[in-house]
């Protein structure tokens, strides 16, 4: 079963950001994801396929 990505979840990607963090917060979900680096706050837009392929860990947000 495919993982369900939701706004507020934290994904750990295989490759780290230049600031050293590998954790990203999901700000937007769709064909493209908007991710915010948990280390420096930098925001990027990436295709859904790239996020699904490179996710090592998914932490669901606390309800």
Image: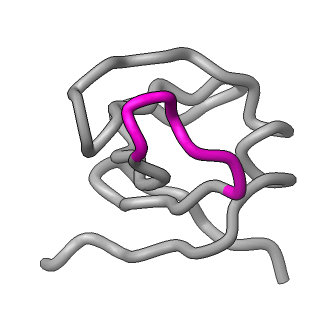
In the rendered image of this protein, does residue 3 appear above or below residue 36?
below
Q: Is residue 5 above or below residue 20?
A: below
Q: Nearer the viewer, residue 9 or 55?
A: 55
**Residue at left offset 80%, top offset 73%:** 2
Query: 62 or 11: nearer the eye?
Result: 11
Q: Quadrant of the N terminus?
A: bottom right
Magenta stretch? 14-20
Q: Residue at the bottom extreme?
A: 1
x 51%, y 34%: residue? 17
Residue 20, image x, y percentages? 42, 43
Q: Is residue 43 above or below residue 13?
A: above
With 28 as the anchor, is 51 left or right in this view?
right
**Residue furthest to the left:** 63
> In the rendered image, which quarter is residue 27 located in?
top left
Indicate the position of residue 13 as horizontal and vertical percent values: 62, 55
Residue at 44 percent across and 32 percent down: it is: 35
The colouring scheme, among rainbow, by chain, secondary structure or one colour, is: one colour
34 lies left or right of 46: left
Residue 27 forms part of the magenta stretch: no
Question: Is 16 contained in the magenta span?
Answer: yes
Q: Quadrant of the C terminus?
A: bottom left
Query: At 56% from the left edge and 16% from the top edge, which residue is drawn?
Result: 45
Magenta span: predominant SS is: loop
The one nearer the camera, 48 or 30, is 48
**In the shown orientation, is residue 25 left or right of residue 31?**
left
The tally of labels here is 0
Q: Position of residue 51 (x, y in %)?
A: 71, 44
């Amino acid at each position: 079963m495919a993982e369900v990505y939701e706004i507020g979840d934290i994904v750990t990607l295989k490759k780290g950001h230049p600031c050293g963090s590998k954790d990203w917060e999901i700000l937007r979900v769709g064909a493209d994801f908007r991710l915010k680096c948990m280390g420096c706050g930098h925001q990027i837009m990436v295709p859904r396929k790239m996020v699904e392929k490179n996710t090592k860990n998914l932490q669901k947000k606390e309800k």
